[in-house]
Amino acid sequence: MNILLDFIPFQHIGGVSGAASFTKAVTDEVIRHRPVGTHLFAVYDSTLPVTGRYHCHEMAEHNNIKLIDIRQATLADIVSHHAIDVFFMAIAQLYKHYNLNGIRCKTVMFIHDIFDAERADNYVDATIHDTGLESRWSRCKRLVNIFSGRSQRLARQCYASLMPLYTAPKTVPYTVSDYSRHALCYHFPAIKKEIKVCYSPLRQVTRNHTIENPQLQEIVRSGKRYLLMVSANRLYKNPHTLAKVFKRLNDERTDLHLLTLKMGRKISPQHTDIAFLSDSDLCYAYEHALALVFPSYFEGFGYPPVEAMEYGTPVVASNVTSIPEILGDAAFYFSPFYPADLYRALHEVLDHPDVKIDKMRRRLAEIHQRQDDDLKQLINDLLTP
């Protein structure tokens, strides 16, 4: 049996996204459970950077996987030449610029979310702005794209290239939440087959005995009481609302600190921004935080809240898209469109930090069971021609 894996997510935005984490977790399971006589191949793109976090060539060498450059042949030719039985496409949108015609093997294909289509439909883009992340000129261009219909056209073009394969007879279509499944069915009524859901499995992280990053080390050593936000460099994660609310909250609670990852700017003396944390250090950051703040406008699944709850850290989260589905009653919710609602939720978690401990434990157990069951189903699909 020959399986073609997807290494392109490891090259996407430095390999630090949830897409890369998902792909790594599934790849590890395939490697662990592959039957004797199974040959593994992996597609990558030689024109994209190879990151240090998940180095494609090192991963291939260590696991006896043959790397194939997608720039040297079409996917259909790769499948035919190497007699591929199953192709695992981890993040479909990363393939929108490649030729997907003529793929005749079984394809297990994931579309994690369709935010590009949804934001073009509901005009949420028009309400989002962060002067720290986006220049006035960039925002003007984005607004022109929205109201001229260009954003909608680009989204249609993307899915016009993906949907023929996603709906093909030999394709097993997947997504990562019930919310995303319903969104796909709503926006693409031509999908007539069942879309399977696989809750994103968590990566296994080996935790070091000490904190490596000196900034985080100092924060933890000094016992600072801090709120945590990760991926604060991304507009749709909504760091602007948290920055605004934290400044207001800091007037009342002067001992409160904010720790962000990758925001790229300092908003107050009580704020520390760190450009990068290793997986091990991120565990320490979760563990010592008063709460993780997750103000995202959109998520297909959302790793950070689940990761934070592993350490008993409360989560203050948006009440939109897949987030309430994943977290259930274990989070402190607020509307990402109303700063005053985040202000209320932060007061609630700071005043009563332990009120949801039992609910977090119960919900984590439910999530873990669902992740285990879904991953077994996925691996069975990947290892069955």
Image (spheres, rainbow, N blue to C red):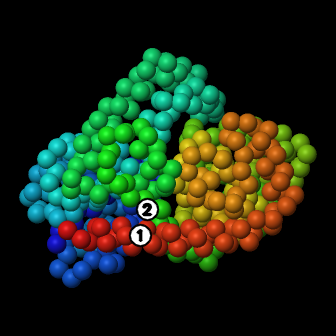
**Residue at horizontal 24 percent and vertical 42 percent from the top:** 164
Q: What amino acid type should be assigned to the residue bearing mark 2? A: Cys
- From this viewpoint, is residue 366 visible? yes
**Residue at horizontal 47 percent and vertical 29 percent from the top:** 120
Rendering quarter of residue 267: top right
Q: Quadrant of the N terminus?
A: bottom left
Indicate the position of residue 278 as horizontal and vertical percent values. Answer: 55, 63
Indicate the position of residue 43 as horizontal and vertical percent values. Answer: 24, 56
**Residue at horizontal 61 percent and vertical 45 percent from the top:** 320
Rendering quarter of residue 140: top right
Q: Are marks 1 and 2 in contact (CB under 8 Å)?
A: yes
Q: Mark 2: which secondary structure?
A: loop
- From this viewpoint, is residue 213 visible? no
In the displayed image of the protein, which residue is found farthest to the front? 192
Q: What amino acid type should be assigned to the residue bearing mark 1? A: Leu
The CA distance from mark 1 to mark 2 is 6 Å
Q: Is residue 7 above or below residue 161?
A: below
